[in-house]
């Protein structure tokens, strides 16, 4: 690296300026930020520090993924993302050139410039950001791993308390807890969450005593601006939380008006400290896949001790809902979720999580207007909770054919929680469905950088479909084949998948592909595809191969299942609205299909799908 170039400098090239310290690429013309994933920024930073040098792939991969073994395809996708952002085409000419068999070369002239002082407007913005704070999970310093839940519980309760402060922006637990266990600079976390301050801390417990230490950190500098320690009995945990929240508000210099000097809440969440302990243990299991059964057991103990504990009933609803969504429990779990959510709402009509669960209930039963109402209400009550925006996209907008709106809600969830893998995955999915393949590829890469594995659903499916849409029929089957379960492989699934994509490239293979699909469809029970129902892929494949009779025959299985159980798998519906499925929708039988699922009532009240018109009992597609 040239001596004149600093790792945290400002680099200019072409029409762009890379602000290394701020980890941001902007337009030199107007300062407009250019969206890039974290790894794409790392790669660009390394390239501009070595202008003109031929960098072999192993060197670049070691710089971007230090101490991590990754596939070469990850680097290829990062370079493709950079070329798109820089407007350099797929091959690269002005900025990043591929030297076949050797590596990459940044060919544009690079100039390091002094970092200008921020304009007054930016200084005012930083000052205003003091009224925004992210509460990170508190580290558990206890020797007993069974008490690790204390740290998460303290942080979560502080989020609940601080959201009550007028004018204070506090990201939801989903957003800030995504950084748990990740060794990231607090300045990066602050930028990603759009806050000016961060709160972190630790909890140590011994017997019934707890010691809580909290630090308030300025996100722009990383400097500590306040810290305090508290020693209490666990029985006094609610008083500790009130005192800590009040100290934070005071440190932020926020005026509470007539509530100055008073606790932020009038009553604690429960009067039973042991019920609260059970509650904390249960919610600590939410991030542990497969632990919902244990969480439900703890929450049932909790509500038995205090039947008026609203949050415990709401979390019971969430846990039961999760059991249904992952397919381990049937419709009975939905009923339990509904009972718990209704109990929570009877105690507190403003319980946002309970409204969201009720919305899922209605969406799963094809009660689209009620689902829309419940999820909108949940977003009104807690607009910073990303999961509700995602749920609205999945359970209402996607099935209803409003893919652009669904993509916008998914993107909003990602903006609120850029550190969560699920948020990036959902933006990728809805971007693809709504026709924005480049955005989909960008967020597939973002999800991979956050830990999503390429050989698992849904990332593998997205990669296969992005390749298909771009005409890369030979490459498309490979990621899909990696996720085929054994029962599909046993029925010739691997060969069939390759044959289907070959038929999409050359119609001469279509008769054999259709014969294989019809054999796969035969019988009462379809093979599985994990959480992704095989019926969806059958409908799509039959449609793309021109076999509309087969596609609508497969779609009738969705209708028959709905009639039999009263429950829909909403994952099967959103993809039926993507542009490649227009022949399926233009077929007269689609009108009856949509009517059976109750969509016409929804469209009459909330408007038809994008690009469509409703005339009486017919949906006019364009």
Image (spheres, grey):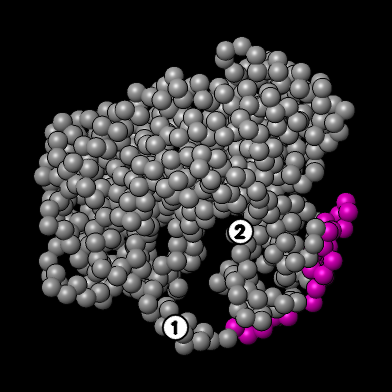
The reply to whether residue 16 is in sight is yes
For the residues labelled 2 and 1, say whether their Cβ atoms are less than 8 Å apart: no
Q: Would you name the residue on which mark 1 appears?
A: 123
Query: Residue drawn at (13%, 37%), measured in percent from left and top?
Result: 306
Q: Quadrant of residue 465?
A: top right
The reply to whether residue 179 is in sight is no
Q: Tag 1, which secondary structure?
A: helix
Query: Residue drawn at (78%, 23%), measured in percent from left and top?
Result: 513
Q: Would you name the residue on which mark 2 appears?
A: 37
Q: Position of residue 399 (x, y in %)?
A: 51, 40
Task: Report the residue that reaches farthest toward the front.
Answer: 616
Residue 329, above or below 439: above
Residue 79 horizontal side relative to residue 532, left or right: right
Query: Residue drawn at (55%, 40%), measured in percent from left and top?
Result: 618
Give, as a single range, the part of the protein colored magenta: 91-115
Q: Is residue 97 magenta?
A: yes
Task: Report the residue that reaches farthest toward the top.
Answer: 523
């Amino acid at each position: 690296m040239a001596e004149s170039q600093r790792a945290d400098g400002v680099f200019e090239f072409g029409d762009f300026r890379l602000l290394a310290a701020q980890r941001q690429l902007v337009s030199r013309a107007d300062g407009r930020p250019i969206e890039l994933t974290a790894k794409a920024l790392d790669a660009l930073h390394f390239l501009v520090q070595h202008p003109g040098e031929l960098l072999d792939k192993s060197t670049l991969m070691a710089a971007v993924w230090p101490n991590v073994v990754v596939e070469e395809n990850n680097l290829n996708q990062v370079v493709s993302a950079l070329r798109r952002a820089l407007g350099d085409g797929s091959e690269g000419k002005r900025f990043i050139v591929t030297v076949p068999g050797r590596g990459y070369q940044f060919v544009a002239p690079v100039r390091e410039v002094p970092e200008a002082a921020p304009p007054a407007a930016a200084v005012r913005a930083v000052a205003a950001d003091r009224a925004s704070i992210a509460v990170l999970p508190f580290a558990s310093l206890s020797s007993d791993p069974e008490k690790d839940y204390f740290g998460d519980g303290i942080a979560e309760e502080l989020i609940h308390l601080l959201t009550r402060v007028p004018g204070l922006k506090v990201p939801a637990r989903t957003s800030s807890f995504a950084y748990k266990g990740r060794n990231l600079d607090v300045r990066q976390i602050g930028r990603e969450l759009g806050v000016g301050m961060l709160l972190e801390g630790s909890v140590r417990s011994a017997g019934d005593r707890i010691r809580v230490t909290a630090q308030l950190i300025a996100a722009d500098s990383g400097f500590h601006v306040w810290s305090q320690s508290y020693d209490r009995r666990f029985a006094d945990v609610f008083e500790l939380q009130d005192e800590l929240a009040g100290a934070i508000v005071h440190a932020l210099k926020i005026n509470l008006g007539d509530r100055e000097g008073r606790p932020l809440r009038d009553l604690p969440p429960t009067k039973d400290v042991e019920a609260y302990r059970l509650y904390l243990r249960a919610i600590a299991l939410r991030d542990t896949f497969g632990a919902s059964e244990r969480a439900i057991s703890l929450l049932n103990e909790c509500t038995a001790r205090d039947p008026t504990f609203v949050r415990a009933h709401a979390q019971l609803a969430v846990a039961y809902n999760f059991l249904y969504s992952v397919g381990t429990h049937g419709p009975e779990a939905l009923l339990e979720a509904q009972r718990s959510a209704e109990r929570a709402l009877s105690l507190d009509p403003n319980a946002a999580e309970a409204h969201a669960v009720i919305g899922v209930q209605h969406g799963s039963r094809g009660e689209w207007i009620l689902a829309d109402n419940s999820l909108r209400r949940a977003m009104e009550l807690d607009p910073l909770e990303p999961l509700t925006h995602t749920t609205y996209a999945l359970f209402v907008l996607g099935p209803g054919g409003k893919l652009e709106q669904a993509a916008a809600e998914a993107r909003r969830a990602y903006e609120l929680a850029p550190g969560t893998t699920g948020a990036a995955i959902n933006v990728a999915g809805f971007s693809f469905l709504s026709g924005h393949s480049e955005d989909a590829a960008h967020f597939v890469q973002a999800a991979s950088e956050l830990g999503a594995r390429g050989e698992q659903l849904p990332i593998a499916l997205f990669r296969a479909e992005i390749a298909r849409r771009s005409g890369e029929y030979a490459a498309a089957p490979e990621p899909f084949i990696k996720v085929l379960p054994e029962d599909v492989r046993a029925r010739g699934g691997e060969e069939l998948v390759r044959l289907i994509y070959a038929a999409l490239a050359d119609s001469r293979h279509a008769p054999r592909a259709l014969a294989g699909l019809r054999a796969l469809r035969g019988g009462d029970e379809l093979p599985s595809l994990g959480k992704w129902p095989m019926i969806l892929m059958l409908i799509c494949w039959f449609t793309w191969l021109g076999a509309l009779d087969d596609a609508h025959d497969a779609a009738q299985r969705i209708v028959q299942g709905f009639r039999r159980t009263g429950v829909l798998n909403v994952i099967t519906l959103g993809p039926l609205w993507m542009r490649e499925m227009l022949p399926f929708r233009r077929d007269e039988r689609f009108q009856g299909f949509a009517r059976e699922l109750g969509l016409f009532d929804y469209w009459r009240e909330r408007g038809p799908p994008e690009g469509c018109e409703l005339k009486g009992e017919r949906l006019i597609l364009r």
